[in-house]
Amino acid sequence: MTGGLVDPALADAPCLGAAGGPTEADWAAAVKVVRDLPPDGRVLLICHVNPDGDALGSMLGFGLGLSRLAVGNLQATFPGSAEVPEPFQGMPGLDLLVPEADAYPDPDVTICFDAASEARLGRLADRLRDSVSIVVDHHASNTRFGTIHLVDPQAAATSVVAEEWLTRLGVELDAEIAECLYIALATDTGSFRFDVTAAVHQLAARLLATGIRADEISRRIFDTRPFDSVRLYGEVLSRAEFDPAAAQGRGLVWTYATLEDLARYGQRPYVLEPLIDSIRCAMEADVSCLIKQVAPEEWAVSLRSKGEVDVSRVAVNLGGGGHQLAAGFTGHGSVFEIMDAIRAELEKSVITPDAAA
Ligand code: AMP
Ligand code: MN
Ligand code: MN
């Protein structure tokens, strides 16, 4: 069955707007940690498992920024770091990346990007407990692990927080840093469709002013997939189901992809990431769900809402996390068991006018 509650207290907490962004004291503490680093200090940067553009982009963009300050010895890694998803293999800053097994066992400072909880860091979570640890994130469901929290639930991407920290450190943006932060921002905003604010576009403008080419970056990250993945999409989309009664009648569209599907088309898991956007466009449903098999009894579940359901609450209650309108968790068992658990949680997660206030 699906994972149980990680933290029962968290499950009952409101998932949006529960906390403001970093305080001036948080920023001052984070800036001081970097300023006080001895030249030979070991700094380990980590991000969440199966990294997306925001996890890698904010980590590598910040890492490149730190390298410009020439403080400390830098390493970057993530759980299962042997596999950088293909779309990100040309990213600047990848030379900072080391295999997880080679990461400093005892860093002086550990900085963690885009992870809502320690569970997203696998064995690397140990490093946070044994060093000064700074958590840079934007998930409303962040569990506030680590020593210093630069967590802003209002930020469209972790890279927004990373860029502010770089600015406060006096680092000037250059094209390499900007490319990483732009990939992060473009990924988490769905290419500037979600979380679109003046601040998001102002950050994008600062990044583009370094001379990076948004068209080339977007083509590489979003529009470069093998032909056979297109045929795989066809098959997975053709089995999508519409459940109008789900979420107290708000409606649910869902589908799944198995390891067997990937093997039949000779595809790697990363090609499935954009598929949730193809099913979420169905206008009859508020909620969409894509269930991607990662092991015989293990599935990565993506949830999206258009505004009437808090899918972060669903994901947190099933052992995951995320944002009100985009969340995920790792499900165990069969697709049908996972769907039953999701349906049950959806009934309890409709946003009522009172809860949204
Ligand atoms: P995805 O559906 O993978 O694009 O993820 C949507 C959001 O949910 C992101 O903010 C993720 O960080 C979060 N998320 C996805 N999977 C998990 C998980 N297993 N645990 C916690 N958060 C997750
Ligand atoms: Mn992420
Ligand atoms: Mn993110």
Image (spheres, helix red, strand yellow):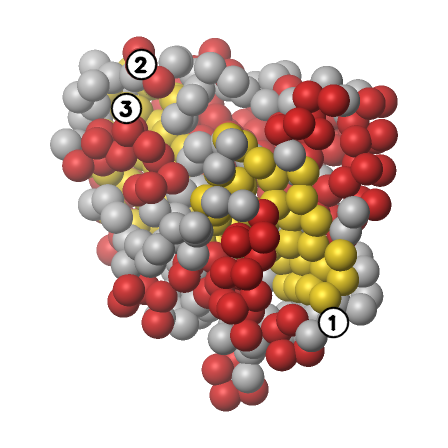
In the rendered image, the vertical position of residue 206 relative to residue 3, given as above or below: above
In the rendered image, the vertical position of residue 340 relative to residue 82, given as above or below: below
Determine if the C-beta at disc 2 is less than 8 A from ligand 1.
no
What is the CA distance from the residue labelled 1 to the residue labelled 3?
Answer: 50 Å
Which mark identifies residue 101?
2
Name the residue at the bottom extreme.
354
On screen, residue 225 versus residue 15, left or right, reads right
Q: Nearer the viewer, residue 357 or 9?
A: 9
What is the CA distance from the residue labelled 2 to the residue labelled 3?
Answer: 16 Å
Residue that label 1 marks: 244
Tag 2 secondary structure = helix
x 61%, y 17%: residue: 89
Question: Which tag is nearer the camera, tag 2 or tag 1?
Answer: 1
Of callouts 2 and 3, the N-terminal one: 3
In the rendered image, the vertical position of residue 77 relative to residue 306, given as above or below: above
On screen, residue 83 versus residue 308, left or right, reads left
User: Residue type at mark 3?
Assistant: Val
Locate residue 303, reporting x and y percent: 59, 55
Residue that label 3 marks: 43
User: Residue type at mark 1?
Assistant: Pro
Of callouts 1 and 3, the N-terminal one: 3
User: Residue type at mark 2?
Assistant: Ala
Locate residue 7, reporting x and y percent: 28, 59
Residue 175 shows in this picture: no
x 24%, y 17%: residue: 104
x 62%, y 79%: residue: 248
Locate residue 313, reporting x and y percent: 46, 65
Label 3 neighbourhood size at 10 Å, few (<14), some (14-19), many (20+)?
Answer: many
What is the CA distance from the residue labelled 2 to the residue labelled 1?
Answer: 47 Å
Tell me if label 1 and label 3 are in contact, CB under 8 Å. Answer: no
Tag 3 secondary structure = strand
Label 2 neighbourhood size at 10 Å, few (<14), some (14-19), many (20+)?
Answer: some
